[in-house]
Image (tube, rainbow, N blue to C red):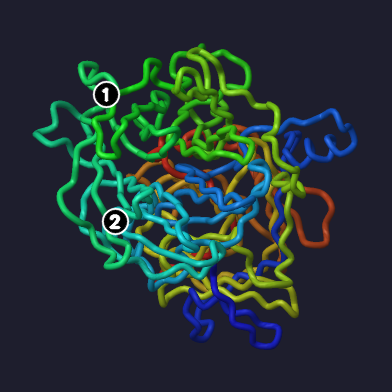
Amino acid sequence: MLRSIGMGGIVLLAAFSQGALAGPTATIDYMEYAAVDVPSNAQASMEAAAVPSSNTFRNPVLPGFHPDPSIVRVGDDFYTVTSTFSWFPGLPVLHSKDLVNWRLIGNAIDRPSQVDFSGLGTNRGLFAPAISYHNGKFWIVNTCIECGGNFVIMATDPAGPWSDPVWLDFGGIDPSLYFADDGTAWITYNDAPPGPPRYEGHRAIWIQQFDPGTMRMMAERELLVDGGVNPSDNPVWAEGPHIYKIDGWYYLLTAEGGTAYQHSQTIYRSRELQGPYRPGPINPILTQRDLPADRQDRVEATGHADIVQLGDGTWWGVFLATRPFVGQSTLLGRETFLLPLEWKDGWPRFLEQGEPVPMELPRPNLPSSQPVDYSSWRDDFNSPLSDEWIGLRTPGPEQQLTVDTTDGVLQLVAGSAAAGSSGKPAFVGRRLRHHSADIVMRIDFEPSRPGAFAGLLALMDENHFLAVGKEQGRLVVRLRTDVAQDETGEVVAEQPLQTNGPLELQIALRGGSAQLSWRGAQEDQWQMLCSPIKVEPLASVHAGLFTGLVIGPYAYAPD
């Protein structure tokens, strides 16, 4: 998390520099989020309490920007971790008792000293973590793209602190750690095939022994899968491997087809840990790529799964998927879904071929937990920022953010890095979790130099964002949808501003449209700043597919 240091009523976030406030400073009194007409698991849980016969949950269980989920069960507790790429803090660790309601308990990468994302694109950084548990210790293996390679971190408490990374000597991505019955440890991962690639996206799944004592890779690696289930079809991007031992068989669960609409999940098994592995009689065991585009409650891009067994012997799995509002477009990014596995003749599957992902289905056979409600929240900054708040790239010395818990304000010093740069913008935000949502913030900002800006930023990546806020004498809307555009975004709307003092800004998102409004802090009536802005070009399908929209206060002032 962003470590806090109490100083009376002032909370300094130590991940940011702690020098004197040196530039134009935006003061944010509150920020709130409200979904519009969206059912939630919290609502379903409350209905279940009122109507005992109701025993269902809704997908996704982790709405908004939670891709590549990995899961582990420890006794009656479940933990999951997801990808965060170049966002900090990274690798959120979530806990659940019922697989449906998940609570964020920390971030495994929460100190700038652990990894350095400086200068990286939003879609680089931390890919596809895998969490496991062995002999009283939690392990995460992960890949930091363009920032160190593959590493392992450990913790005795999943809430943290997690250790500094130990960098491992092997290539590829998507490592997963498996502890065998004989006490040995093995890492499976995606890497290049044994010979020259035959086609774009030709990858292989490898296994290599790992020594947890010396924290080193051992011996030679072994090839498990070359290409995919049907090599003659030139399958692409075999990745995300996990191994499980069940009834004397070693099962290898992998993804295939890339993380867009062709995404799928495949299964293999072997009597020996190191193979040979043969694919199941029905593959893929999860995909939505062959379903009609006009179906109800459309879910796409299913894959990158991990599975866990419950005490009653049943198996359940988490996986990523998207909920497009049109075509393949979503502002939410890839989210975490939950489904049971069915076993037939020794082989698991999530869904029958041609079966759509259900949005509502019976709960796991577990005691229901206190519901988690993602549909609304408000932060009055009366306490340190929660772990839900994230920023782009590792914090550096030029940025400063403070929370004054006495006055209940967040102060953000305008930085010289624009939202569209490869620097560290003065920006902190939270994930968008619904297609329709209203985000409101009260801000006080006096631009003291030309080009200074502060307001609300909705950012998919450095080339795709929307910002609404105050510049000298005017309110402006800036939009960036292409790398060729200015790093601050192009001005697509503006309005002279006659009032001084605090303002309230609102972004009302409705699928691919955003209505931007403002009002004085003491006013009731919202004033539309412009006609609705088309924001479908910000969708993750146009921005590298990996991330989701993050929204929060942002301040910029050129040098």
Q: Residue at x 56, y 18 (%)?
A: 356
Q: Secondary structure at mark 2?
A: strand
Say few, some or many: other residues with alpha carbon within 10 Å of mark 2 (under 14 / 14 to 19 / 20 or more).
many
Q: Secondary structure at mark 1?
A: loop
Three-letter code for the amino acid on which mark 2 is drawn: Asn
Q: Residue at x 58, y 30 (%)?
A: 339
Above or below for 219 versus 464: below
Mark pair 2, 1: CA separation: 24 Å
Image label count: 2
Say few, some or many: other residues with alpha carbon within 10 Å of mark 1 (under 14 / 14 to 19 / 20 or more).
many
Would you identify the image quadrant in which residue 211 lies?
bottom left
Position in image of residue 81 (x %, y %):
50, 51
Position in image of residue 405 (x %, y %):
71, 77
Position in image of residue 147 (x %, y %):
29, 60
Three-letter code for the amino acid on which mark 1 is drawn: Pro
On the question of residue 458 being in view, the answer is no
CB-based contact (under 8 Å), mark 2 and mark 1: no
Above or below for 415 versus 459: below
Residue marked by disc 2: 150
From the viewer's perspective, is 382 left or right of 206? right
Which one is nearer the viewer's eye here, 362 or 67?
Answer: 362
Residue that protrudes farthest toward the left in the picture: 196
Position in image of residue 152 (x %, y %):
35, 60
Q: If you read the primary sequence from the N terminus, does the residue marked by circle 2 or circle 1 appear first?
A: 2
Residue marked by disc 1: 235
Quadrant where the N terminus lies? Answer: bottom right
Quadrant where the C terminus lies? Answer: bottom left
From the viewer's perspective, is 444 left or right of 354? right
Residue that protrudes farthest toward the right in the picture: 50
Above or below for 539 versus 359: below
Mark carried by residue 227: none
